[in-house]
């Protein structure tokens, strides 16, 4: 099975995430689209790890360790980001990101 | 068409449809549920790629922790009504066109790349013993740094979420 299939699947998932970030204005959905993009990258890295493992490299597990660290960072990011969203909602009673325009004044 | 390709095709179609559901559904709760389904199909891909440990961790961390956090926030703030204003429609079209252009460019750039095929046999690479040896032999320092990152994220979340007086 060619590794291109996984590349194209990851590209499609990543571009769906980009589209969601650009199209939606709900801050929570934008966060979920960022998670989707991170997962597309993770999937690609696991596919390349399998490719190197098939080629006989012994250090192919490093890619899976990187995926593990990306999950760690994503979890920390979600904790802080959702706290910020809750704070914004408490102050403005909306999660529309256009409201954050007033930060520039 | 081999069994592996059929499984790949089914999982890919489900994950792409659910990913479209995330960005197209009006209700944030159904967006979260679509994203959970996408994560489960991605975990299926991990199992097919011999990354069993990562598949389990992915389900536990993403579907079990992160998406539950999203659901909690959505339900606590009572956001499941559609409150997104629908003005400025051209912004949506601009976003869709930019994302589609990125997709076309990436696919066109990588279409002719020559890559080896994935073998169908199982490898030991994704088992927990192998990954643990790699993690604690070569990546101990990033592992410890990530614990500091978690601590600071926890403190940050508490400080940000605290009501000021």
Image (cartoon, coloured by chain):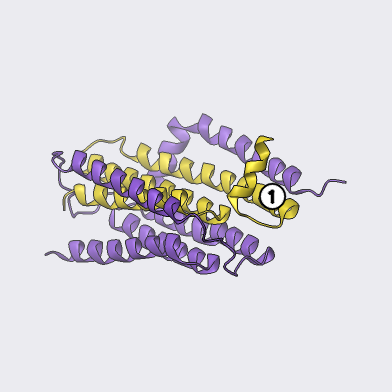
Chain colours: A yellow, B purple
For residue B92, say whether it is visible: yes
Nearer to the camera, A19 or B35: A19
Horizontal side, residue B16 vs residue A81: left or right: left
Q: Percent from the top left, x then y, of residue A3?
A: 20, 47
Q: Residue at x 18, y 66 (%)?
A: B3
Q: Residue at x 40, y 48 (%)?
A: A18
Q: Quadrant of the N terminus of chain B?
A: bottom left
Q: Percent from the top left, x then y, of residue B45?
A: 32, 57
Nearer to the camera, B149 or A9: A9
Horizontal side, residue B138 vs residue B146: left or right: left
Horizontal side, residue A20 vs residue A99: left or right: left
Outermost residue toward the right in this view: B165
Image: B53 above or below B138:
below
Labels in figure, total: 1
Task: State the SS at label 1.
Answer: helix
Q: Residue at x 52, y 61 (%)?
A: B86
Q: Percent from the top left, x then y, of residue A27?
A: 57, 52
Image: B125 above or below B66:
above
Image: A49 above or below A20:
above
Nearer to the camera, B80 or B54: B80
Q: Percent from the top left, x then y, of residue A29?
A: 52, 56
Horizontal side, residue A32 vs residue B154: left or right: left
For residue B124, say whether it is visible: no
Query: Residue under mark 1: which chain is it in?
Result: A
Q: Residue at x 24, y 46 (%)?
A: B104
Q: Assess disc 1: are there few (<14), some (14-19) or many (≥20) residues with their C-alpha within 10 Å of its C-alpha.
A: some
Nearer to the camera, A38 or A70: A38
Label 1: which residue?
A88
């Amino acid at each position: 099975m060619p590794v291109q299939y996984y590349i194209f699947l990851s590209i499609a998932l990543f571009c769906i995430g980009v589209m969601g970030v650009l199209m939606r204005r709900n801050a929570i959905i934008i966060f979920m689209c960022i998670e989707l993009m991170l997962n597309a990258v993770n999937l690609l890295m696991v596919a390349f790890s399998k490719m190197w493992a098939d080629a006989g490299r012994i250090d192919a597990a490093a890619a899976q360790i990187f995926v593990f660290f990306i999950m760690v960072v994503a979890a920390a990011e979600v904790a802080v980001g959702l706290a910020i969203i809750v704070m914004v909602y408490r102050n403005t009673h909306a999660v529309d990101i256009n409201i954050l325009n007033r930060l520039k004044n | 068409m081999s069994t592996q390709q059929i499984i790949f095709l089914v999982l890919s179609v489900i994950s792409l449809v659910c990913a479209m559901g995330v960005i197209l559904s009006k209700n944030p709760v159904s967006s979260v549920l679509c994203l959970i389904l996408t994560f489960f199909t991605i975990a299926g891909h991990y199992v097919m790629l011999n990354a069993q440990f990562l598949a389990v961790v992915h389900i536990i961390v993403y579907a079990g922790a992160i998406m539950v956090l999203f659901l909690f926030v959505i339900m606590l703030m009572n956001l499941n009504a559609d409150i997104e204003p629908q003005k400025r429609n051209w912004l949506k079209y601009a976003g869709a066109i930019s994302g589609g252009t990125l997709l076309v460019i990436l696919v066109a750039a990588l279409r002719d790349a020559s890559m080896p095929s994935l073998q169908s046999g199982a490898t030991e690479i994704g088992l927990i013993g192998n990954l643990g040896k790699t993690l604690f032999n070569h990546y101990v320092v990033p592992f410890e740094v990530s614990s500091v990152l978690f601590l600071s994220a926890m403190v940050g979340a508490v400080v940000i979420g605290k009501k000021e007086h």
